[in-house]
Amino acid sequence: MKSCLIVDDSRVVRMVARKILVDLGFHTVEAEDGRKALDICLKTLPDAVLLDWNMPVMNGIEFLRELRKLEGGDQPKVVFCTTENDLAHIQEAMSAGADEYIMKPFDAEIIQSKFTQVGLI
Amino acid sequence: MKPEDFDLLSKLVRERSGLVLTPDKSYLLESRLMPVARKVGVKALDDLVVRLRGKADASLERLIVDAMTTNETLFFRDTKPFEQLRRLILPGFLERRAAKKHIRIWCAAASTGQEPYSLAMCIKEEADKLKGWRVEIVGTDINIEVIERAKAGVYSQFEVQRGLPIQMLVKYFKQIDGDKWQLGNEIREMVKYSEFNLLADMKPLGQFDIVFCRNVLIYFDQPTKSKVLDRIADQLAEDGTLYLGGAETVLGVTDRFEPVPGERGLYRPVKKK
């Protein structure tokens, strides 16, 4: 079973994403900010990260840059999932090493489509 | 819905488009035609049928047929057909058409443009191999409204996130009005759209090397499927390729095509003896 770390400061978003990802066959772990997500990754790297942008303590892009510096940190597929829906943010995310990008609001179909794109499904 | 109203509507749709509506699909008529009813200023489907039974009204008939033939689609639908195109089909034509340097592709049910534009992006990605080549993509649909949408190449945030890799969005689209995205001219100009009914004479469309006719035949009855496939066979080059949807087949429908071994959804014309 593949694992997905859901990183979002909204409990509701995490809950919705968890439901979708569990239905898609993923084991999920959750973090409410980038710092906590990084702590999880320092112990065990997930197969995938669904990542919000704007979060307290450490935001999504800072987390991504730190993740990619870790040993094996280039392995998890990172899919941004954010309300930042402009081209500049998308390009910044891709440059920082994101594999895919979801513009909120999302639904199960979009998550499935994006996770398929990056070979997670 | 009254059985006689269902019969009238399904007959109209069938005669104009080939689309077969069985009585268990009456819910589809109701959900698709309520917006039409509102558009023409009547409150209920019964009133719409009364108007239809009245004096001949070509524009109302058109609205009804269009509403029933609008089908949802997405970019790079099913993924595999586009992978087959790049891995198998295009390299074959690059070899066999090396002298002519010309390939014609037909999307027979272009809908709002996602399939022909996915093809155009695929072709664009192979630009290095196609220098000096002319690749024509013709997108047709029976529904004039979706053709107009396809030409504009404007998609919602939801639509561009279904099937389209983010790299392609960044590369080929520009953001307009916040949550709308428009394909750039270089891709839009690669596709020529026109209104076309698959029941009509296909000869004016000319000959094609590749035909995409996916998820259309499922709506036709058996004789119509046979007729459409036989006519497509007439328009397809001897070494051409036909793409059908995953739930469609030529087996038992026509003997003009045979499956390409090991390649689901791909068919080639049977060589004449």
Image: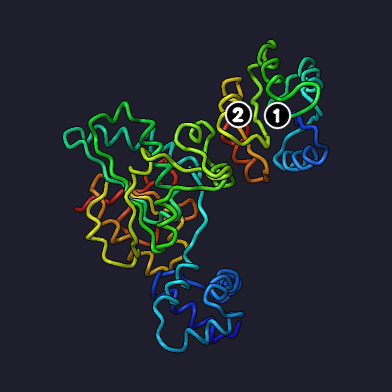
Residue at point 38% right, 34% down?
A: B86
Relative to A22, is B105 on the left or the right? left
| Image coords of residue B43 (percent x, y) | 61, 80
From where the camera sits, is residue B210 visible? no
Task: Tell me whether circle 2 and circle 1 mark residues in contact (CB < 8 Å).
Answer: yes
From this viewpoint, is residue B66 visible? yes
- What's the CA distance linking mark 2 and mark 1? 9 Å
Amino acid type at mark 1? Trp
Rendered residue at 32%/53% (across/down): B257
Q: Is mark 1 on a helix, strand or loop?
A: loop
Q: Residue A42 carries which label?
A: none
Label drawn at residue A53: 1
Residue B138: percent from left, percent from top: 32, 50
The answer to whether B221 is drawn above or below residue B88 in the figure is: below
Q: Report whether A1 appears left or right of B165.
A: right
Crowding around mark 1 (Cα neighbors within 10 Å: few <14, some 14 to 19, many 20+) is many
The local crowd at label 2, few if under 14, some if 14 to 19, many if 20 or more residues have their Cα within 10 Å, is some
Check the residue under mark 1 and report the chain it is in: A
Which dot marks residue A89? 2
Q: Residue furthest front?
A: B177
- x and y percent of residue B124 in the render? 36, 34
Amino acid bearing label 2: His
Question: Could you tell me which residue is drawn at 61 percent across and 33 percent down?
Answer: A101
Residue B146: horizontal and vertical position, in percent? 44, 58
Q: Is A86 placed above or below B214 here?
A: above
Residue A35 lies in quadrant: top right
Along the line of sight, which residue is nearer the eye, B100 or B247? Answer: B100
Secondary structure under tag 2 reads helix
Q: How many labels does the image show?
A: 2
Q: What subunit carries mark 2?
A: A
> Is residue B141 shown left or right of residue A99?
left
